[in-house]
């Protein structure tokens, strides 16, 4: 299966490397012309293909959004219809109230199945994944399953925390953001919240 | 040639009773720290711009000028200058002035800014921060060429055949990179040196950044340029003492920062890993810190290492001891190891 990683900044190349190491085909896209990120791809995620966002997404089985939140509004929603989309973005600086980015992502990317995960792990803590527990929030059971399989294969221990709205648990200011929480702790926080 | 420096964010220090010193005293102490860095033979002393009550060094260049007046050899610079929220013309003027005062010892490390307090302070929108940095870096590179400048952009008034004074020799300019590959490529495209800020995790994971930088320099037809490392640390006579002194303050500072930046809250286990051979904290005895520095410099093909010393809550005396040990013990050991 092919993974499309949108974003060639701090986070994107790390996720691309993890996916490549797990045997996935990876297309990576920055903003604009793919030539701009060819050198970055060659050195930071060798084996991935630098593509435009639309080419990367078109034949991907799973899309990871690893772009700054303020760029999200520049994505063409039509590209994502029918796709499983992992939202690893955060409001930055943090919003005054924890407000799920994923609910906004789902609202805008009509027809996509959105899963919130990985946003609560700093990029320098992602590699190696080392079986680290990561929270997983979404409204589509099928998309949650696809995302969980992907996360497991790249080395994480995905823990469902509920619906997309419940994904606020994973946002800055929440109890697991930037914390190396165990599976049991994720489950405890999930129970407390529901 | 390898060079060694110290960076500080100018954290407010505590007195013997644990009371924070005033901002004024903190700043005066910082001058003493810079003077000691020169006395122990270090090559560089850098101050990172910050705008918070626990890091009151908002006008680092003024402090650097005071240090310049009392030293003769050490290079003085920013670590970093948050160029995105500053005016490149003013940055150029301030550091050209420092270059004149210090007889050619100024350096600048430009950054996008990972602490973002300066954006609301100066009326910038964080959402623009990449565009601001891109355009302002371009203008700064043009200014460094010298001579009347003609420039037009979106972030400041246009310049037409404008003299920007004082005229001084060009000074070394670096780009500080925390993890953005675009910044690595940008540094190479402008012919700026690369300063890798490694503040967590295995330093070896930055090796591909060094390779990317060298390749990009070649592609842009530029000569090789130095790669530097900026990492936090603390030196004491023994490993145990250094680790014990640093830990409570590290825990406090990182826990607070982590809430907004996504850093994991440190645990005794994660701390042990970070101060160990595969972590980013250069905390320990001179031998331990030197061994780790030499290994990291080799791994990343770096010719410069700047130890970011001091963290909120340590005392001025403890920082002076770190500076002394770093200059007189650590650096000679690293030089031997790399020879």
Image (cartoon, grey):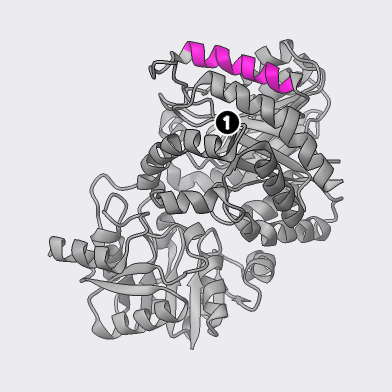
Q: In the rendered image, which residue does mark 1 sit on?
A: B48
Secondary structure of the residue carrying tag 1 is: loop
Residue A122 horizontal side relative to residue B74, left or right: left
Q: Position of residue B126 (x, y in %)?
A: 44, 43
Please tell me whether residue B30 belongs to the stretch shown in magenta. yes
Residue B246 picture location, percent across and down: 49, 35
**In the image, which residues are magenta?**
B24-38
Up the image or down, B142 lies above or below A169; here it is above
Task: Determine the chain carrying the residue at label 1.
Answer: B
Identify the residue shown where x is 50% and y is 45%. Answer: B129
Is B180 placed left or right of B225 in the picture?
left
Q: Residues within 10 Å of mark 1 (few under 14, many from 20)?
A: many
Residue in the foreground of this view, choosing between A165 and B126: A165
Q: Residue, x 76% and y 59% (percent of image)?
A: B216
Near-viewer residue (B244 or A170):
B244
Residue found at x 34% / y 74%: A158
Q: Is any atom of residue B228 visible in this view? A: yes
């Amino acid at each position: 299966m092919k993974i499309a990683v949108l974003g060639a900044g701090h986070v994107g190349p790390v996720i691309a490397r993890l996916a490549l190491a797990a045997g996935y085909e990876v297309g990576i896209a920055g903003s604009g012309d793919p030539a701009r990120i060819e050198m970055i791809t060659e050195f930071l995620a060798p084996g991935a293909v630098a593509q435009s966002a639309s080419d990367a997404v078109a034949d991907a089985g799973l899309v990871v959004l690893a772009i700054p939140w303020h760029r999200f509004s520049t994505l063409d929603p039509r590209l994502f219809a029918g796709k499983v989309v992992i939202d690893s973005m955060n409001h930055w600086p943090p919003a005054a109230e924890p407000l799920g980015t994923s609910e906004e992502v789902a609202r805008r990317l009509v027809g996509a199945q959105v899963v919130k995960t990985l946003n609560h792990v700093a990029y320098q803590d992602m590699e190696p994944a080392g079986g680290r527990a990561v929270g997983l929030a979404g409204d589509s059971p099928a998309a949650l399953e696809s995302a969980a399989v992907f996360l497991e294969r790249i080395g994480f221990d995905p823990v469902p925390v509920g619906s997309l709205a419940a994904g606020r648990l994973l946002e800055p200011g929440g109890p697991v953001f930037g914390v190396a929480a165990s599976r049991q702790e994720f489950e405890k926080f999930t129970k407390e919240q529901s | 040639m390898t060079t060694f420096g110290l960076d500080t964010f100018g954290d407010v220090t505590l007195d013997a009773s644990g009371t924070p010193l005033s901002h004024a005293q903190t700043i005066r102490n910082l001058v003493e720290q810079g003077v000691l860095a020169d006395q122990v033979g270090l090559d560089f002393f850098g101050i990172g711009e910050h705008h918070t009550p626990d890091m009151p060094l908002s006008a680092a260049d003024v402090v650097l000028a005071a240090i310049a007046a009392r030293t003769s050899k050490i290079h003085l610079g920013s670590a970093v200058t948050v160029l995105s929220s500053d005016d490149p013309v003013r940055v150029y003027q301030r550091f050209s002035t420092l270059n004149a005062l210090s007889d050619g010892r100024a350096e600048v490390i430009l950054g996008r800014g990972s602490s973002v307090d300066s954006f609301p302070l100066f009326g910038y929108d964080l959402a623009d921060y990449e565009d601001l940095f891109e355009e302002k870096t371009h203008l700064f590179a043009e200014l460094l060429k010298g001579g009347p400048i003609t420039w037009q952009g979106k972030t400041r008034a246009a310049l037409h055949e404008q003299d920007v004074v004082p005229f001084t020799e060009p000074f070394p300019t670096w780009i500080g990179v925390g993890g953005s590959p675009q910044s690595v490529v940008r540094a190479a495209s402008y012919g700026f040196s690369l300063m890798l800020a490694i503040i967590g995790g295995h330093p070896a994971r930055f090796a591909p950044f060094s390779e990317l930088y060298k390749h990009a320099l070649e592609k842009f037809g530029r000569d090789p340029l130095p790669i530097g490392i900026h990492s936090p640390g603390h030196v004491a006579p023994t490993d145990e003492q250094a680790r014990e002194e640093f830990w409570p303050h590290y825990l406090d500072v990182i826990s607070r920062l982590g809430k907004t930046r996504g850093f994991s809250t440190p645990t005794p286990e994660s701390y042990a890993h970070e101060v160990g051979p595969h972590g980013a904290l250069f905390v320990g005895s001179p031998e331990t810190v030197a061994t780790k520095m030499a290994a990291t410099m080799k791994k990343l093909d770096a010719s410069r290492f700047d130890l970011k010393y001091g963290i909120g809550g340590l005392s001025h005396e403890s920082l002076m001891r770190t500076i002394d040990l770093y200059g007189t013990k650590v650096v000679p050991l690293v030089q031997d190891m790399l020879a």
